[in-house]
Image: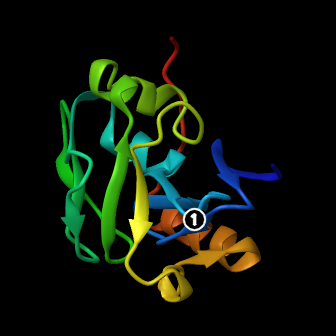
Amino acid sequence: MAHAEYRGCELPEDLWYDLDYLWVKPEPDGLYRIGITDPSQTMAGRIQHVVIRPPGSRRPRRKPLARLESGKWAGGIPAPFDGVIAERNEQVLERPDLINIAPYTEAWLVLFRPDDPAHALEHLVTGRAAIDGLKSWIDRYDVQCMRCAQ
């Protein structure tokens, strides 16, 4: 996985992004793995509580898949497209701080099955355009990424 880095933020180049909170990774089985970006976890602060909707939950685009809470922020994590939660990451429910430690690996939130696979990625960006968009987000919010230790 190629990684760009900007102001301490890790930005994997092979993922898809909504340029706000989410990263999305297409899986070989037709599901999409979804998590939050390094700049997002930094902005949120140490995550203390995570609620993820149960498998089988249908979520329209922009409606929350999960809710994260830190000492300074609480918010919903929106679905990037219409679909159904196939699996949720139970490990993150038990250890919310994993989001601050490994946002792109161990701390994914859900595996999501799109209603319309052919158009699932149409509101997301990847590659150079994604990295440039994330860099402007980081500049706009003046983020300097830091990872929490285990």
Residue 31, above or below 129 = above
* Badge 1 element: loop
Farthest top residue?
A: 150
Horizontal side, residue 65 vs residue 34: left or right? left
Q: Position of residue 118 (x, y in %)?
A: 55, 87
Horizontal side, residue 6 vs residue 61: left or right? right
On the question of residue 143 being in view, the answer is no
Q: Position of residue 141 (x, y in %)?
A: 41, 60
Q: Residue at x 26, y 74 (%)?
A: 62
* Mark 1 lies on residue: 30
The number of discs equals 1
The residue type indicated by label 1 comes to Gly
Q: Who is closer to the viewer here, 22 or 55?
A: 55
On the question of residue 85 being in view, the answer is yes
Q: Who is closer to the viewer here, 139 or 107?
A: 107
Q: Residue at x 36, y 28 (%)?
A: 92
Q: In which quarter of the view is residue 100 placed?
A: top left
Q: Position of residue 70 (x, y in %)?
A: 22, 33
Q: Residue at x 47, y 85 (%)?
A: 123
